[in-house]
Amino acid sequence: MLNLFFNQKNFLQTSLVRNLSGVGAKAIKFTINNKKYESKTAKTILEACRENDIYVPTLCYHPMLEPVGKCRLCLVETNFGGKMVPACVTDLRDGIEITTNSPKVVNSVKSNLGLILATHNQECTSCEANGRCELQDLVYRYGVEDKFPKIFQKSHNMVDSSSPSLIRDMDKCVLCNRCVQACSLLQGMDILSMTGRGVHAIPKTAFDSPIKETECINCGACSFYCPVGAIAEHSAVRRTLDVLENKNGKIVIFQTAPATRVAISEEFGMEPGDISTGKMVAAIRKLGADKVFDTNFTADLTIMEEGSELLHRVANGGTLPMFTSCCPGWINMVEKLYPEFIPNLSSCRSPQGMLSSIVKNYWAEKMGVKPEDVIVVSVMPCTAKKDEARRDELKTESGIPETDIVLTTRELGRLIKLKKISFLSLDDSEYNNPLGESTGAAVIFGNTGGVMEAALRTAYEIALKKPMPTLNFTPVRGFEGIKEATIPFGEIDLKVAVVHQASNIRNYLKKLKNGEVEHHFVEFMICKGGCIGGGGEPKSLTSDYLERRMKGIYNIDEKQKSRKSHENEAVKQIYEQFFEKPLSHKSHKLLHTHYKDRSRKK
């Protein structure tokens, strides 16, 4: 891991040099396939090719990770040195002549693909990555046939299905190192590391322990960056199909998270950030759902409960800073690694947990049906939600899970395709009310900083009896790892912070322990960008997909008739008819939870 740290440091330094090199620098002149180009900034050969729409195959490369040149599929010819070089880790030089499509290059790609196939489990038809596998696409593109002898046969003890969120099948691993980088460089968790050499190399956990027995937080970053099916979400597609096609008198309720509506369209060829809320709801109806509710409803409810909890703690000397609790990966991190901060966590359930609780304990009774006759299917951007749904604290009094099934956004896309539903031709459909009504404050839960901004819009107005000067609270927006702000809040200056991405969270908690930071309220999201970067979102090989999804979320917020959670009429109604007020006895029973020390020390 030390080498990985220094590689990251060198990568960041190289990136800085490249970014500064355009200032007053002489243009780099180069040719690709006999066509002349210029660049005013330093970059790799691969970046130059992609910038000019010239195809170069890759398998280990991802724009969000450090290039390592392991797969050797991006080899190109140049006029320097005589040898082919990996385009992803070779910088442009003035006067360089690059060839990407010569017979020598193409034969090299085919040979390397054949070698990869020789150690790869090719049970493609039943693989979770089938149809969206980067290796599968490359093999088809280059017409590679399986002529290489198999180096080893499938060994079933290499499949780890211990986690409720993720499944690992190392016979499918292509040794790209993406999962290791995602876990270590991006998330700072170091659960996986590369062991062995040659054909025996493989990413493993410490002591080869099952994922469930490690400190894995189930964020799913490893599965998001895996180019094949070696690490994937623990699929619930077949179970959902069975539930929809064999209801046996059951009522099937779907709920969809904020971030899903700006990402599901990518599964059908649309752009990141395209807003497809209506089509998504229509598709779920065609799948056979009896009702489609919006998790945004309970995002608004979360703000009412969490905002009230914050005001109560500030006024009455409660544990501060108060931490948000809607991200299950973050909850896993606290319980497994930082149990000393459990008292800081808000007792509010996540919006998923709240809506499932309301459906099973309030809506079912209102409709005159038994909770066990209602099946709640949750569509989330997050693999850790699968883990959350199994928590003992989130079961009904009779012991049944309040959330029966969790599908990732990717899984919903696969389900829609399996049912041959033409997503792009669907007319928009609306959520079922009253659990489908929401405000702009709810949808921004999908972005890092969104929970904080939504909470401030309401808490400020409730506490000070006047609206915030602006609803667009920009200090907590954007992709900076740790964002801080101070808001005049009556007799105090309310100090808040927003932290996203596990590695940044660990840095923040270290500072908090050392007394280097001081805040009243902190939002944590375990994935980069928040839920829009969740491990269950559609995979992307572009470098700006998070920015575009974030823009889509804020566009929805701007267009909403109401942008404050406390103005949600359906939320007001459910308090009047059932919960009475925030933090009431009923609220604590159905909308709040508790946490437990799951650390190794414990």
Image (cartoon, rainbow, N blue to C red):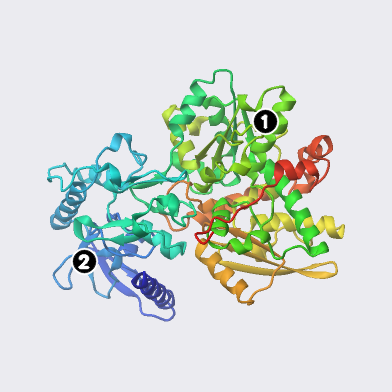
**Residue 344 or 181: which is nearer the viewer?**
344
Reading the image, the residue beneath label 2 is: 85
Residue 68, position as x, y percentages in the image: 30, 65
**Residue 191 or 543: which is nearer the viewer?**
191
Can residue 64 be seen from the camera position used here? no
Tell me the quarter of the picture where residue 46 sits.
bottom left
**Considering only vertical position in the picture, is 565 above or below 364?**
below
Q: Secondary structure at mark 1?
A: loop
Q: Quadrant of the N terminus?
A: bottom left
Q: Answer whether labels 1 and 2 touch (C-beta < 8 Å).
A: no
Q: Is residue 177 left or right of residue 152?
A: right
> Hey, which residue is sitting farthest front in the picture?
602
Reading the image, the residue beneath label 1 is: 432
Q: Is residue 89 left or right of residue 540?
A: left
Q: Amino acid at mark 1?
A: Asn
Label drawn at residue 283:
none
Residue 281, position as x, y percentages in the image: 58, 33
**Considering only vertical position in the picture, is 552 above or below 31?**
above
Q: Amino acid at mark 2?
A: Val
